[in-house]
Amino acid sequence: MQERQALSARRIDHDLLGFVLHTPLWFWIAAGVLGLLVSAFVGSVGLLVLFGLQLLGYTNVQYWTIFITHFVFWVGISHAGVMISAILRLTQAEWRRPITRCAEVLAIFSLITAAMFPLIHTGRLWRTAYWAFPYDFTRGIWPDVRSALIWDPSAIVTYLTGTALFVFVDLLPDLAVARDRSTGLRHHVYRALALGFHGSARQWRLQLTAGILLSALILPVFVSVHSIVAWDFAMAIQPGWHSTILAPYFVIGAVHSGVAAVVTTMIILRRFLHLDKYITLQHFDTIGRLQLVVWFGYLFFFLMDFYFGLFARDPVEVSIWELRLTQPPTNILLFIQVLTALIIPLPFWFSRRCRRNVSLMFWLSISVNVGMFLERYILVVTPLSVKQPFVYTWSPPYQPQVIEYVITIGSFALASFGLLLFAKVFPIIPLWDVKEGQVNSQEVQVGRREVPAAIHD
Amino acid sequence: MADETGAVLGLFERPDDVAAALDRLRAAGFTGHDLAVLTDSPYPEGAFGEEPVRHRLYVFPFVGAACGFAVGLLLTIATQFSFPLVTGGKPILSIPPMINVLYEGTMLGALIFTFLGALFESRLPDFRPTPYDPRITEGYLGVLVRRTAGHADEARAALRAAGAFDVVPPPSAREEAPRALAAQR
């Protein structure tokens, strides 16, 4: 059963455009803090460009480290946004309405953050363009499509473009509302962006059809992108990475962390933009059930990754698992990963009361992403460790340096800053979708019950 | 901005009145092509008795996919022949690794063409001056008579009779003057 209040169109506009048209004090504080952190991020990248990769904690054998971890992590975060939005649209689930745009926008900014890391990782960002994009007409050196690393840019460009178009199509009617409610320069900007949308039956029909088509097209792209990210590793003949399990394991891991990130974002937006009437406890209840299902899928692939590692009895592969399970600090990180991504959330998600506890859901979502970040870290970094011959000790472990911590914090600030600015300029909850839900929620009599006309839960 | 088509917009509060307005306008001789219902959210198709929307948006993804595949094929083949580096003893033109780039190119083409198709079929961008009222995005329903061809008064009368609480634009001074003169006579 849907839990929602009857709201007038004017009330919906007032509530959901309030933050767009009026700026509270906290926005400036939040933007200032995030802006500072993003500046620190940019400054640190500048230092890397200036002084080179010597500032990082790379060792002779470990050179795919925290930046590649970030790349995998942020691509993962970007996934669930589009997945949730596209699946719920295709299935016409009623509860999708207030959360789809927030999930899609999170996907865009996560993906932008992710796409920066391979560039930062190479140290000479501008040269990466030669390596990835076919434009070098003078030297005769072209991207080698036989390398898995070249598949990535094609996948990310497709996914980012598709997601941005998906968001824009969905945003058009709301830009028309913003056009009608704003004045001055802002009115002119919204007017230009709304492209003259005025809500005719034809425009609505095309808008809905385009939404369905884009959803159907972007779902396979979502699966392909994280599979291709996994193949960056799996195509290399490197024990610990060279495994067929990696593609589905990455995809399900992406869904696990991405859904948690959507929950975190929803709760923050609900709290600061006063969206309690729109993002209700029912949403957290439903999404908690989804997390439970994803949890079981993730557990399966987590166990299979371990099993695949041992099954071949490759001595190097076995030794990598030995490192992960017995050698500090890797074994401590693995323990924290299992605890935070798997063990802690499970009992709470079984309970309806816990799923409806917003604070608890917030901390569980953070817990999942702490675990998932560690999972990516362990997966990326440990296979590059080498057990030295004859002395039987491991190569000196990679230790992140200060600049890597700053860039790590900065990356979270960057994605949050993007999301905050988007929410300031555009409505983060689709006005038209909520209004359509209100139209469809008119009740019909079934036996002795009054039930909403639309009951796709 | 002056509207040269003589278009008229009636504003309504209830969907039933909009359906009645369309019936009256058709009875007054306006065709479905001249009429449009403006709303702030999508209503079920045919809710106001309007004609079904015909479009060819479904064709666009296929055309886009074909274009994307062709560009991907050209790119992957051309770059491999332009930079003939033997990798691991594999042939210069190696098809299996092309599949990923071809797939992404195909999907990218389909996505872009779907987007462009949606704009094209929606007749957007459209910045031509037509009667519009911001109250439509406040929840009121609008019935737009696009071309009145000198029958603006009939359109206004039909909209008013069906329950429109406002009709925009109001009769202009040029339209009002002969009427006032006739009334004096």
Image (cartoon, coloured by chain):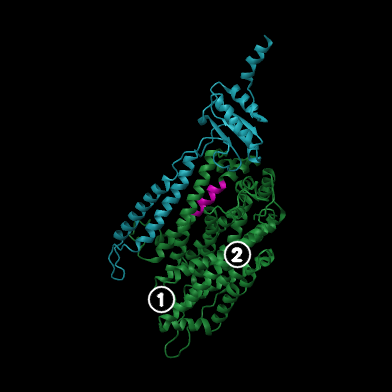
Chain colours: A green, B cyan
Q: Amino acid at mark 2?
A: Arg
Question: Could you tell me which residue is drawn at 58 percent across and 69 percent down?
Answer: A369
| Vertical comparison of B57 with A284: above or below | above
**Number of numbered discs on residues:** 2
- The subunit carrying tag 2 is A
* Quadrant of the snapshot with the C terminus of chain B: top right
User: What residue lies at 38% left-to-right and 59% top-to-bottom?
Assistant: B101
Query: Which contiguous range is marked in magenta?
Result: A162-171
* Amino acid beneath label 1: Gln
Q: Quadrant of the image for the N terminus of chain B?
A: top right
Toward the viewer: A191 or A448? A448
In the image, residue A61 lies at what x, y percent?
45, 78
Q: Which residue is mark 2?
A: A289
Identify residue for label 1: A238
SS for dot 1: loop
Residue at the extreme front of the image, as rendered = A447
Q: Secondary structure at mark 2?
A: helix
Q: Residue furthest right?
A: A25
Q: Real-space Cα distance between discs 1 and 2?
A: 37 Å
Mark number, residue A368: none
**Residue A235 is at least partly visible in this image:** yes
Is residue A233 found inside the magenta-colored segment of the image?
no
